[in-house]
Amino acid sequence: MTMLRRIFVTVALLAGLAGGVSPVFAQAPAGQQNPAQRDQQEGFVPIDQLPPQDQLPAAPLLIGAYVFVLLALFGYVFSVARRLGAVQREVQRLEGDINRSARR
């Protein structure tokens, strides 16, 4: 259980770091906003009327979500594989003990 917890914490930290450097969450101070940002705050502006640097494409967010899910999936599969290996070694050890005790 501790290995799964470590993997979860690692994935959560990586996702937090990835989200922390994302320009999606960055905001300019009120005095440094361009006119398009002020228009957004005052009312609705269609996305095709915004300058390209102010448009929010969905691709980086979608890719980030897929990366997070894949990292979590690989971490889970790795954890299960390690535990399964430990169980297989234990079964082999027990089979050896049974064979040795049957010979006596």
Image (cartoon, rainbow, N blue to C red):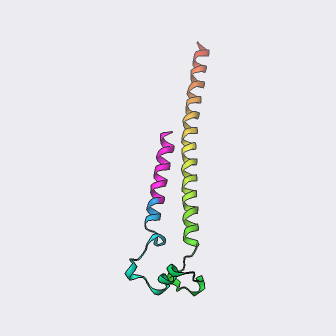
> As rendered, which of 92 and 48 lies closer to the eye?
48
> As rendered, which of 31 and 59 lies closer to the eye?
31
Tell me which residue sits at (51%, 81%) in the image.
42
Query: In the shown orientation, is residue 98 left or right of residue 11?
Result: right
Tell me which residue sits at (42%, 82%) in the image.
33
Q: Start and end of the magenta stretch?
A: 1-15
- Dominant secondary structure (helix, strand or loop) of the stretch shown in magenta: helix
Q: Which of the image's four quarters has the C terminus?
A: top right
Residue 78 at x, y = what percent?
A: 55, 47
Tell me which residue sits at (43%, 61%) in the image.
17
Relative to 33, residue 10 above or below: above
Indicate yes or no whether the magenta region holds residue 10: yes
Tell me which residue sits at (49%, 48%) in the image.
7
Number of on-image labels: 0
Residue 1 at x, y = what percent?
A: 51, 39
> As rendered, which of 18 and 93 lies closer to the eye?
18
Q: Residue at the top extreme? A: 104
Relative to 87, residue 76 above or below: below
Residue 52 at x, y = what percent?
A: 53, 84
Indicate yes or no whether the magenta region holds residue 61: no
> As rendered, which of 89 and 102 lies closer to the eye?
89
